[in-house]
Amino acid sequence: MTTAGEHFVNALAKRDRDGLLRVIAPDIDFGGLTPGRSWSESSAPELIDNVLFQWFEPQDIVEEVVTLEVDTLLDAQRVGYRFRVSCPDGVHLVEQQMYYEVNGSGQICWMRAVCSGFRPIPDDSTDA
């Protein structure tokens, strides 16, 4: 069975707005940290447009979901994932850890996330 976190990661990797809207509750309680900035939102459309699609802009292409790990932490779920992202300035790895809860409909209603930022992959590196 695929978790809500896995659905979230796969939809984010594809920039699938409709898929994200299906997995994120309309009244999400979101908090996140990226290098140099904290983020918060309380509605799914604003989370997608003002946060997630700012983290990964149209020119940033997720080439691969390199890792995807799921786990349970008492009453919360955890999903950790690493994307290989092609950007105008090169290829990068981006790792994020997300803790979340789901509502009775199976949608993510509470989420806290932290991001590594875009870490450049050296040109001569074949191992990500």
Image (spheres, rainbow, N blue to C red):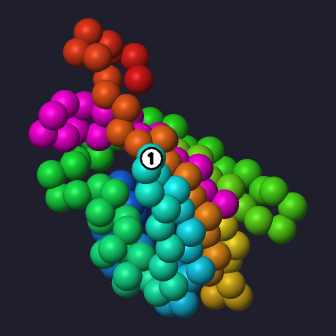
Q: Is residue 39 one of those drawn in magenta?
A: no
Image x and y of residue 97, in percent: 59, 50
Residue 62 visible here: yes
The structure residue drawn at horizontal position 37% and vertical position 84%, both measured from the top left corner, is 45
**Which quarter of the picture shows residue 54?**
bottom left
Residue 104 is left or right of residue 17, and the answer is right
Image x and y of residue 57, in percent: 23, 57
What secondary structure is found at the residue carrying circle 1?
loop
For the C terminus, which image quadrant? top left
- Magenta residue span: 82-99
Task: Assess disc 1: are there few (<14), some (14-19) or many (≥20) residues with their C-alpha within 10 Å of its C-alpha.
Answer: few
Q: Which residue is mark 1?
A: 35
Residue type at numbered disc 1: Pro
User: In the figure, 48 relative to 13: above or below?
Assistant: below
| Depth check, front residue: 109 or 6 | 109
The structure residue drawn at horizontal position 43% and vertical position 50%, both measured from the top left corner, is 36
| Depth check, front residue: 50 or 8 | 50
Most common secondary structure along the magenta stretch: strand
| Depth check, front residue: 27 or 41 | 41
User: In the figure, 4 relative to 128: above or below?
Assistant: below
The structure residue drawn at horizontal position 19% and vertical position 40%, both measured from the top left corner, is 87
Image x and y of residue 30, in percent: 56, 74
Residue 68 is left or right of residue 37, and the answer is right
Total marks in image: 1
Residue 78 is left or right of residue 32, and the answer is right
For the N terminus, which image quadrant? bottom right
